[in-house]
Amino acid sequence: MSGRAVLWIGFAVAHLVVALLGLYGMGWPLGDLVTYRVWAEEADLGVLRMGIDAPWVYPILAFAPMAAALALGHEWYEQAWLVIVTGLDAIAFAVLLGRGVLARGRRIAAWWWMLFIVLLGPVALGRIDAVTVPFAVAGLLFALGRPRVAATLLTVGAWIKVWPAALIGAIVVASRRRSEVALVAAALSAGVLGVSLLAGSGLNALGFVGEQTGRGLQVEAPGAVPFLWMIAAGDRSHRVYYDRDILTYQLAGAGVTEVAWWSTPLLVVGVTAVVLAGVRAVRHGATAGRLLAPLSLAVVIVLILANKVGSPQFATWLIAPIVLQAVLARRRVLVPALAGLGVALSTQLIYPYLYGWLLIADPALVLVLTLKVALLALLLGWALVAVWQAGSAPERRVGRPVGAARSAGEE
């Protein structure tokens, strides 16, 4: 049996295991799909079209997979969703494996991706973020060889869930063909907005921009860790409560509102600092092949660490940059690969299996969340060092991106 066939078997097994955990495992790991189904059914019945008739927390293209999952009917919505996500993952997996001789870096990236989703568990497939992962993986793989294809994929992903826009920004900084990427992204975004306006959305098409601003500090957010330790130590002036308007658990108490408010400026400052580090690297001669993966990873981690929401599915944002790092520079992927797997495992331990213990600030679960945040900080530190070194050290051979000349070779 060929190595490529073994990888496809691994792909099938990993997705089957995670799907079964989602359908039959402990907790309510596919709970978000119930909300997606309600939105899809309301639109199907002509009652309400989210993002068109009312502001929505997601960009407008997020409705496409939600509606598509109704194809098998109400009773099979979860199964249809899992099939859709698995199919999209399969396309990106095929792009990763490529044609011809299968390089070692691509094998490492493929196995790592499958192990990551198993360690992350049901949220790896059962959230809208899961739909964006294959767009992000394929987009970054195409970024160096076919930037216009990359821009198309990532822009579509960003109109499903905003975060892939950060990858577009990283490509604009790192690539010599940045103008092509920016123009494609702008043109496609204008097209999406135009169609939304024709459908009668008005400003609702951009409702996702403001929907997050009124949220408080979610219990899984990195900024919640100090308050959870205070509760665990017996502080009764802080508490965890359920917000019925946005259907999530948040924190209340002295200082919580301030931390939630400052998270947005901190995010802006953090992203700006990472971008400036990338610009500095480019000006010092860094090539896109060495810069793009760590720059993408750094931007994504800032989005996670400075986020007041902290949902478990945010861990999936790590997949595409680390996969690209494995493909382009497998000898420099050990630290991010292991840290990323640690983030995935700690995330699944917290949600869905032991989430109730986190809600009462059990010290063991608060420690797990603390370790997860520490691993993310380690990843950010590694990525920033790699970005800095990309503009300071002689370029080594890196792997061949999709669409690049074969003569470039792979490590």
Image (cartoon, rainbow, N blue to C red):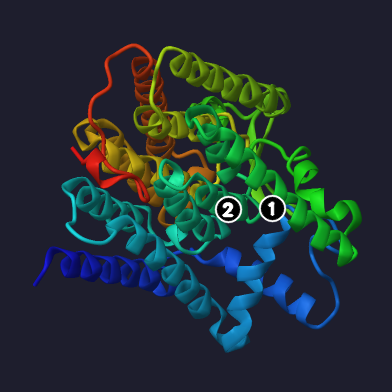
Residue 42 left/right relative to 318: right
> Which of the pair 122/394 is nearer the observer?
394
Q: Position of residue 242 (x, y in %)?
A: 68, 49
Q: Where is residue 46 in the image (x, y as percent from the top left)?
A: 85, 80
> Which of the pair 187/132 is nearer the observer?
187
One can see residue 53 in this view: no
Which amino acid type is marked by label 1? Answer: Leu
Residue at image coords 31%, 45%: 405
Q: Dots 1 and 2: beta carbons under 8 Å?
A: yes
Quadrant in which residue 256 is drawn: top right
Which amino acid type is marked by label 2? Answer: Thr
Residue at image coords 51%, 79%: 80
Location of residue 203 with respect to 253 vertically, above or below = below
One can see residue 68 in this view: yes
Q: Where is residue 137 in the image (x, y as percent from the top left)?
A: 42, 51
* Distance between mark 1 and mark 2 Cα atoms: 7 Å
Residue 89 left/right relative to 217: left
Helix, strand, or loop for circle 2? Answer: helix
State which quarter of the image contains the C terminus: top left
Q: Where is residue 43 in the image (x, y as percent from the top left)?
A: 78, 76
* Disc marking residue 188: 1
* Disc marking residue 175: none
State which quarter of the image contains the N terminus: bottom left
Residue at image coords 56%, 31%: 224
Number of residues whose C-alpha sits closer than 10 Å to that of mark 1, classed few (under 14), some (14–19) or many (20 or more)? some
Residue at image coords 46%, 67%: 88
Helix, strand, or loop for circle 1? Answer: helix
Task: Return the disc, 1 or 2, that comes first in the chain's sequence.
Answer: 2
Q: Mark 2 points at which residue?
A: 152
Number of residues whose C-alpha sits closer than 10 Å to that of mark 2, classed few (under 14), some (14–19) or many (20 or more)? many
Location of residue 408 with respect to 42 vertically, above or below = above
Quadrant in which residue 18 is drawn: bottom left
